[in-house]
Image (cartoon, grey):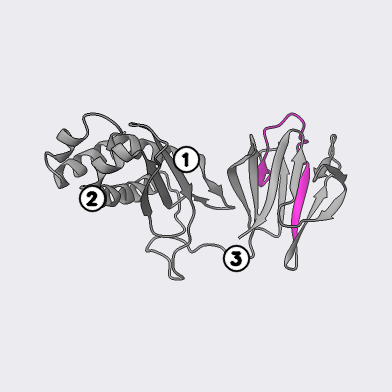
Amino acid sequence: MPILKDFERRLEGLVEGFFAKAFRSGVQPVELAKRLLREMDANQTIGITDIWVPNHYVFTLSPFDREKFEQAEQALAGELRQLIRSGAADRSWKLVGPPEIEFETDERLGKGQFRCEATLVEGPDKPLTGEIPAVSGMEGLLHLIQKGKPTRTYTLGKDVVTIGRLSGCDIVIHDPGASRRHAEIRRDGNGYVITDLGSTNGTMVNEATITERNLEEGDRITIGRTVLEFRRR
């Protein structure tokens, strides 16, 4: 991948000779870069017109690896921030704020082990050049829940958002238990209302079948085997 090769080349130029000696074992800088790109891809927030990706990443390292990184931590963080910008631009993704990188230590991790947590952190009111400002704090979101965790986020950015298997729906669900046009969520003042559109298998909210219902923070919508959690930001 060209952007990964550029990342390695720039990093070696900044700390010439250091990485060749310090990183013969344990976590390699390029492993962090590859994980960052995977997290960007896995944690997309899909809006009506744009795709937003995390801009804040926390890498948790073992004591062994954190000590190795210490001398070049600032240089590495700078190059990872550039990788976020390059990765987003390469895929026409959007960032809600400036890229941020943090490093932490976990005594329980062994040499070569690390974790990465990716989140969207809004920047100042003035957007970065070429970026679109984040949506209003009252905007509704639907988190796709898989194995108990959110894996994808959809923004309720229109007055009426349709959900179903049909490719023309605003939120397309690839679930055999979903109808082509299964349900819709409409904005009602400062709130949101979900309505079943006469689906074959019905729509459930918090395990109760509904025809129409006002959505509240944390409500879980079940369509077939697909679970969507309603939130605001």
Mark 3 vs mark 2, foreground winner is 2
* Left or right: 140 as drawn, with respect to 29: right
- Res 41 label: 1
First of labels 3, 2 by sequence position: 2
Residue at screen point 57% across, 52% down:
47
Q: Secondary structure at mark 2?
A: helix
Q: Residue pushed farthest front? A: 107
Q: Secondary structure at mark 3?
A: loop
Provide the residue designation for mark 3.
137
Q: Position of residue 117 (x, y in %)?
A: 46, 45
* Left or right: 147 as drawn, with respect to 91: right
CB under 8 Å between discs 1 and 3: no
Residue at screen point 16% across, 47% down:
14
First of labels 1, 3 by sequence position: 1
Mark 1 vs mark 2, foreground winner is 2
* Mark 2 surroundings: few (<14), some (14-19) or many (≥20) residues within 10 A: some
